Image (cartoon, grey):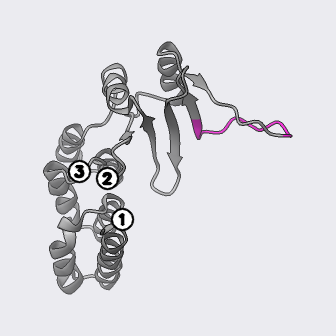
Amino acid sequence: MNPHIIRIVPSPQAPYTLVSEKLESLGFARYDAPTAEPQPVSENEIWLSNDERSAVHWIVDDLIGVSYLAVRGTDAIALSEQLRIQLPTDSVVKLQLRAIADRDTDALMDTLYRTAVAADSGYDPDAYSLLRWGLNDLDPLVRRVALVAVSITGWTEFAELLAWVSAHDPVEQVRAQAISVCTLLREQTIKTSP
């Protein structure tokens, strides 16, 4: 993961409008790409700092249903810490508590996706534990969502667990998906090796 790009997952209590207001209060301006034709306002937006050395991207990932911020630039670490203080966000610890408290299948699947996006700075044992828990859930749909979440992390630490799931899960689709995710992680490792 690029150390100069940091993902922040705003909690559902932090809608786009609140994020936009906070960024503007920090001196960021919404970037409007020059185009020949007027463009509709997108849910995927970019804000630039006055010196244009830092940017914040609001990204709506419709595939997994998670909106998040990608902070990049020279002040990415300080800016991301400031945003985490000023906005309600989902940390891995908050997501663990949510998973324990709410056994609703939809909420658990959302929590697994949010965990994968929130744990972007390299291996995180708390996020690993939560995703491992999802891989062992009784519901095969939750296990499949956990496999997608594992693929988002890109962590090779899941290789042994994925091998076990691909050999022992009682559902064929889960076993096949585990093989696919294991292959994907292996390919990512080969691409990033020096």
Outermost residue, front side: 194
Residue 62 vertical position relative to residue 22 in the rendered view, above or below: below
Q: Are marks 2 and 1 in contact (CB under 8 Å)?
A: yes
Outermost residue, top side: 25
Q: Earlier in the sequence, mark 1 or mark 3?
A: 3
Query: How many residues crowd around disc 3 within 10 Å: few (fewer than 14), some, or many (20 or more)?
Result: few
Residue 40 among those drawn in magenta: yes
SS assignment at label 2: helix
Q: What amino acid type is highlighted by mark number 1?
A: Val
Name the disc covering residue 103, or none. Answer: 3
Query: How many residues crowd around disc 1 within 10 Å: few (fewer than 14), some, or many (20 or more)?
Result: some
Name the disc covering residue 33, or none. Answer: none
Q: Residue 154, located in which quarter of the rendered image? A: bottom left
Residue at the spot 37% in from the left edge and 71% down from the top edge: 191
Q: Which residues are magenta?
A: 36-45
Residue 120 among those drawn in magenta: no
In this rendering, would 121 be left or right of 56?
left
What residue would you read off at disc 1? 148
